[in-house]
Image (cartoon, rainbow, N blue to C red):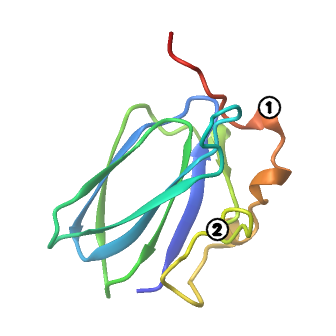
Amino acid sequence: KGVLRGLHFQNPQAQGKLIQVLQGAVFDVAVDIRVGSPTFGDWVSVELSEQNHRQLYIPAGFAHGFAVVSETVIFSYKCTDYYNHAAEGGVLWNDPDLGICWPVREPLLSSKDRTYPRLKDIPADRLPHFEKLP
């Protein structure tokens, strides 16, 4: 309980992710970080739990994070591409420009998640780009 992970992304070789909780509950967040997107910097959240059976699809080009709100959690990911460590990136979980309303006051963070930059400080060439469909 209280663990917060994120906000993670991969670029290049971005992954779409289908997220589901098998046991417990999480507050799950997706942030549009695609340069040129009309919703750049916008985020959505949903509680995923074993009780509500909800799933969340996070498209490629979005950052993902979650906070555990139950005592324990078992999380399931289905990804559109393989994990590539060299493509890994992240946005600071409490970036004030995003204004995500996390449900934990003092989250348990990994050292990596604690030191990610704010979205505005990530070079545009390091972020995914919005591709308008024809």
Q: Position of residue 10 (x, y in %)?
A: 59, 40
Q: Position of residue 119 (x, y in %)?
A: 75, 53
The reply, left or right, for residue 47 in relation to residue 33 is: left
Amino acid at circle 2:
Trp
The reply, left or right, for residue 47 in relation to residue 120 is: left
Q: Is residue 14 above or below residue 132?
A: below
Q: Is residue 93 above or below residue 36?
A: below
* Upstream in sequence: badge 1 or badge 2: 2
Q: Residues within 10 Å of mark 2 (few under 14, many from 20)?
A: many
Report the residue at 72% width, 67% height from top: 95
Q: Residues within 10 Å of mark 1 (few under 14, many from 20)?
A: few
Q: Is residue 120 above or below residue 27?
A: above
The reply, left or right, for residue 61 in relation to residue 89 is: left
Report the residue at 17% width, 68% height from top: 52
Report the residue at 57% width, 62% height from top: 6
Q: Which one is in front, 22 or 52?
A: 52
The disc label shown at residue 125, or none: 1
Q: Is residue 70 above or below residue 33?
A: below
The disc label shown at residue 107, or none: none
* Element at label 1: helix
* Element at label 2: loop
Q: Which residue is mark 2?
A: 93
> In which quadrant of the rendered view does residue 74 lie?
bottom left
Report the residue at 17% width, 70% height from top: 50
Amino acid at circle 1:
Asp
